[in-house]
Image (cartoon, helix red, strand yellow):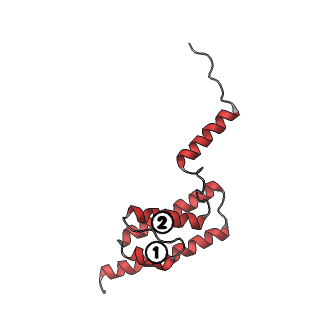
């Protein structure tokens, strides 16, 4: 029979936390923690997964043009998922406040109508 399980020392706990953060990508130098830059980063990662080119951060005109060439349903779902993921990560980092959430929501709301126009065009002229 083995002895009682030992409680890890504070240094061992910190080492485990650091390892978990590093494995999740949150400890990397330059990992984004502000909502709007994080939203753009996640959106660009999604674009790359859709075999599209990256768009310069903050360039809404170019982003709208790129998104307009993709399937509207996929874009709408991706925008919703990316917005929620950025909000969740920023809440976890405690970097979310009313001001920066409003900024991100304004960009999100500016990109969202692309999907409505595409859906109307796909539906024909009723």
Q: Position of residue 46 (x, y in %)?
A: 43, 63
Q: Residue furthest bottom?
A: 125
Residue drawn at (65%, 36%) of the image: 13
**Sequence-wise, which precedes: disc 1 or disc 2?**
2
Asked whether the residues under the numbered discs 1 and 2 touch, taking CB atoms below 8 Å apart as contact, a structural biologist would say: yes
Q: Position of residue 98 (x, y in %)?
A: 66, 68
Q: Nearer the viewer, residue 58 or 70?
A: 58
Q: Position of residue 67 (x, y in %)?
A: 41, 73
| Residue 41 - label | none
The answer to whether one can see residue 38 in this image is: yes
Q: Position of residue 77 (x, y in %)?
A: 42, 66
Question: Which corner quadrant of the image does residue 9 belong to?
Answer: top right
Question: Which corner quadrant of the image does residue 105 belong to?
Answer: bottom right
The answer to whether one can see residue 112 in this image is: no
Question: Which corner quadrant of the image does residue 51 belong to?
Answer: bottom left
Q: Quadrant of the C terminus?
A: bottom left
| Residue 43 - label | 2
Residue drawn at (70%, 34%) of the image: 10
Q: Nearer the viewer, residue 10 or 57?
A: 57
Q: Quadrant of the N terminus?
A: top right
Please name the residue that numbered disc 1 is placed on.
63
Q: Residue furthest top?
A: 1
Give the alpha-carbon distance from disc 1 to disc 2, as whole Å. Answer: 9 Å
The number of numbered badges drawn on the structure is 2
């Amino acid at each position: 029979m083995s002895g009682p399980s030992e409680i890890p020392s504070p240094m061992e706990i910190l080492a485990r936390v650091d390892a978990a953060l590093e494995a999740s990508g949150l400890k990397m130098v330059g990992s984004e923690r502000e909502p709007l830059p994080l939203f753009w980063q996640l959106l660009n990662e999604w674009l790359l997964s859709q075999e599209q080119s990256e768009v310069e951060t903050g360039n809404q005109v170019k982003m709208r043009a790129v998104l307009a060439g993709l399937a509207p349903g996929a874009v709408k779902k991706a925008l919703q998922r990316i917005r929620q993921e950025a909000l969740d990560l920023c809440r976890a980092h405690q970097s979310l406040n009313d001001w920066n959430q409003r900024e991100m929501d304004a960009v999100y709301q500016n990109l969202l109508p692309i999907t409505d126009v595409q859906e109307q065009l796909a539906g024909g002229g009723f």
